[in-house]
Amino acid sequence: MTLTENGSLRFPEGFLWGAATAAHQVEGQPADSDWWAWEQIPGKTRDSATAERACEWWAGRYVEDLDLAKAMGHNALRLSVDWARIEPREGQWDQTAIARYREILGALRQRGIEPMVTLFHFVSPSWLAQKGGWLNESTVRLFERFTTHVVDALGDLVDFWCTINEPNVYGTYSYLLGAWPPERHDLLSTFRVIRHQLVAHAMAYRAIHRLQPRARVGLAQHLRVFDPYRPRCAFDRWGAWLQDLLFNELVLSPPVDGVLRPPLAMNVKVPELVDSQDYVGLNYYSRDMVTFDARQPGMLFTRRFAKPGAEFSMDGWGEVYPQGMYRLLKRLGAYGKPIYVTETGIPDNDDSKRSRFLVTHLAAIHRALTDGVPVRGLYFWSLVDNFEWKESYTARFGLIGLDVETGKRTLHDSGQLYGEIIRGGELTVNMLERHAPELIGKAVA
Ligand code: FCB
């Protein structure tokens, strides 16, 4: 994993190379969920498009994408199961949904691709949403019961689990910014939802280990880098520290020390949360600059924005900052657990920036490995263009391009490149020269 004599960056044997997906974003024929209900309202998503077809995995087209994943050499895939399909009404379990997931997992195994299964990726069954969803404390127990059911039903095919995807993003978009269902704008509700998800993670972690003592269980944490816009200004530095505390640290430390630290309230220790992850999952996309802004009391006197003049992905999606990957991996290394990059990727509709993104972020991962950080795999977001939540199909993240009209798949150049990297187990000098010449001769700055 060090720089080889010829200057290429080699990755360790056994590294997991794959991509990440989520049920609602790829499956199509959605079940009765809060997201599906919300998308029906014109204007909620970009172009008012819905996940009705998405990538048609439920209709069988997962086969095409898994074949392409295998052709690229993937040995891992992160996918999720949809709670609304498996438990369409409270306490009622749909065996046909389970059977279909077994088919998909079996198809992965046949191709030598190891699944990591996420149990909650943003979408709740409608019956749960009607009871208050994640605002309601009883959801913790309902999620534990759902987890037990899924592990019972799929456990012979999966022992690598991700309980919950990005509690901080879910809380922020659905309960603070009001951008996703149920469109709330309430800071206290946001913290409550995040707290319930962290406790639910802990209960699920314990439940999975009761059924599968050797399972590997963690959660996918979305972390951002927050840097002071004016590094010499104490107020900006305080703002960056505060954002890090409220977005990153709020979710990072509880599965380690078991302490929930709600701002402006008493700390609570939850015994089940102590040491409740077998690995740390990192979803990393971008960095924000932070400045003090006296006109924004609602945002705790801080303002976040992308660094002017930086390298950007699509409009409005922020800075491309591979050093952030390195910095966050170094930080997570302190937990002493294996680390998986459970997502990273770029919205790039014409695939003109994805290859460079892939190379620079892999070089950053390599640098962390060289420093001794135990990074064990990468799940690139995403395998195939899919339903990108509020942005619907207008922001495309796939290594495989999707023609939304016909469903035709085309392996992008970036997918081709990922395949070459995986098959060779390294970033070659030629790849660095072509996509990131500034990195030649040094690990990522
Ligand atoms: C992550 C989500 C994933 C996808 C990517 C672009 O925050 O987990 O579903 O939307 O962003």
Image (cartoon, helix red, strand yellow):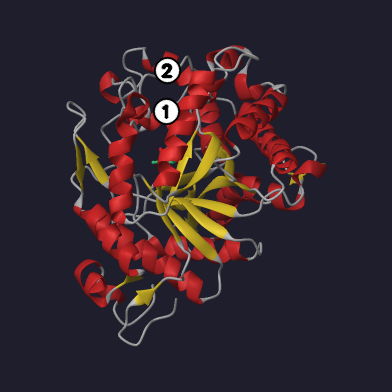
Taking depth in this image into account, of 4 and 294 the one nearest to the observer is 4
Across and down, in percent, residue 254 comes to 71, 47
| Quarter of the image where the C terminus is located | bottom left
Residue 107 appears left or right of 93: left
The image shows residue 428 at horizontal and vertical percentages of: 28, 74
Q: Amino acid at mark 2?
A: Trp
Q: Is residue 150 visible?
A: yes
Q: Nearer the viewer, residue 432 or 83?
A: 83
Residue at 38 percent across and 31 percent down: it is 25
Mark 1 CB lies closer than 8 A to ligand 1: no
Q: Position of residue 72 (x, y in %)?
A: 29, 54
Query: Looking at numbered disc 1 in the image, what kind of residue is underneath it?
Result: His
Identified at 72% across, 21% down, the residue is: 138
Please, is residue 182 above or below residue 394 in the view?
Answer: above
- Whether residue 232 is visible to the viewer of this picture, yes or no, is no
Quadrant containing the N terminus is bottom left
Q: Quadrant of residue 309?
A: bottom left
Query: Does residue 48 sit above or below 368 in this rendering?
Result: above
Whole-percent x and y of residue 269? 81, 43
Of residues 41 and 262, the one drawn nearer to the viewer in this rendering: 41
Residue 161 image-quadrant placement: top right
* Label 1 with label 2: CB-CB less than 8 Å: yes
Q: Is residue 19 above or below residue 395?
A: below
Q: Nearer the viewer, mark 1 or mark 2?
A: 1
Q: Residue 24 has which mark? A: 1
CA distance for labels 1 and 2: 9 Å
What kind of element bears circle 2? helix
- What residue is shown with label 2? 36
